[in-house]
Amino acid sequence: MDIVQSQACDLVLRGGRVIDPAQGLDGVFDVAVSGGRIAAIGKSLPPAKETLDVRGKLVLPGLIDTHAHVYRYVTGRFGLDADSVGVHSAVTTVVDQGGPSVLTFPGFREYVVKPAKTRVLAFISAYMVGGLEGHYYPELYRPDCIAVDDTVRAARENADLVRGIKGHAEIGGFTRWGSEAMRRAAEIGRALDLPLYIHFGQLWPLPEDKHPYDPDEILPEMLKILRPGDILAHPFTRHPGGFVDSHGKVHPVVREALARGLKVDVGHGSHFSFNMARRVLDAGIVPDTLGADMHGYNTTIPKPRGTPEEHPDKQEMHLFAGAQNFSLASAMTGMLALGLAPEQVVAMATSNSAKMLGMEGEIGTLKAGVEADVSVLADETGRFVLQDNEGTQVVAEHYLRPVFCLRGGKRFDADAAILPEPLLADAA
């Protein structure tokens, strides 16, 4: 935490609570920015060309959303605007999970990544169709729709953006095709030496002409093919096939999976259940990273013309009672309400995420010399009602509201239309 001369600094963020798990920092500090990079963190830094008073606010490494859907229009209703999910929600890096594919990655680079002010990365879809509203048409996700060699080639040609592979291990797919699709997805991951991000939970309605696959067999099947560093998503899903088995207990193989080096991403979205989360957390299992999983079915953004009217999962609802829309800060608020400490939650959205992406030390920290990605949040206190898609409500005493972020030293206010307004408990 070096003191710098005032003339060397473009900006000082004055007096906020700085939490940087990568450096073990949690306290009131100033943060100085020069030339688009972090210059210093310290007490009472000299004035700069511009000083922003952030007293009473959280000053964090630029937030990283590990589960976004930002291939707008190409993925139908799923894709949101990258900067709405990103910098205009005080998030500096977003990772599109399974939108672009071997067939559509050139368009993703040209029309999403290049125009965005947010840093946009991707886990390339294992399926040739990627996220082409495919959740509505499950036949597009059969094993024959995975081109292993071509997807490996496409990922190598886009290695600056591709940080992993996205697949779907859920009861709808297993009932139709068993584990073959995920075996092919794992083959892509091994060839690239990149993590495979696995969606758990019932993604599609079950086929009427088949007996349902035992959801408790999905995790054991996955352990046969997954490697250390692969990522299990949706541990708190309300659907079958996740971390909580059909008897309401944490699946006995979960600890084995973690002991073998597998990682866990919340993948909040429409799957999230407070009841399931409590069971998993009470078992001492804390996810590594926190993706918001926002898309067109859990926000109020108008659907593109010609897309389906509703999701096949008829239980889709907005995620906050009395509110519309969602954000990564909202997901962080939920984790705090479940009893996780602020430093745990911040690590999930910063340093842990950077490590998952193979970018540890580049992003997710405020270390001097790194690009100045900084997220500033208001930590509001009161009694706020949060609700999941099962209708379960909890009362949070802290509500994290995005204020602004710096992306490479440039300021962006948190003014996205998708940001929610909380419901006060007294007004419920």
Image (cartoon, rainbow, N blue to C red):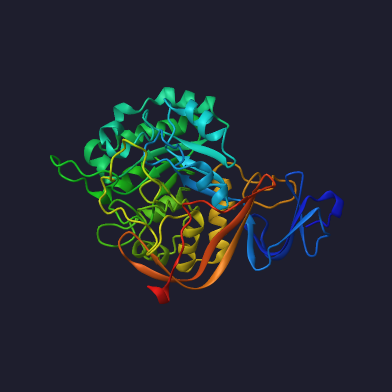
Residue nearer the viewer, 182 or 134: 134
Image position of 121 (left or right of 393): right
Q: How many marks?
A: 0
Specify whether 306 is left or right of 83. Answer: left
Residue 295, placed above or below residue 25: above
Q: Is residue 423 above or below residue 178?
A: below
46 and 197: which is toward the camera: 46
> Given the current orientation, which residue lies at the most extreme left position?
209
**Which corner quadrant of the image does residue 231 belong to?**
top left
Camera-nearest residue between 284 and 65: 65
Q: Can residue 426 be seen in this view?
A: yes
Residue 147 percent coordinates (x, y): 37, 25
182 on left or right of 37: left
Point 77% across, 44% down: residue: 35
Give the quadrant of the C terminus.
Answer: bottom left
Q: Position of residue 131 (x, y in %)?
A: 38, 36
Pick the quarter of the image with the N terminus: bottom right
Q: Is residue 74 placed above or below 61 in the rendered structure?
A: above
Relative horizontal placement of residue 245, taking residue 232 as reference (left or right)? left
Q: Is residue 161 visible?
A: no
- Across and down, in percent, residue 248 comes to 28, 62
Instruction: Report x, y in % for residue 142.
Output: 28, 32
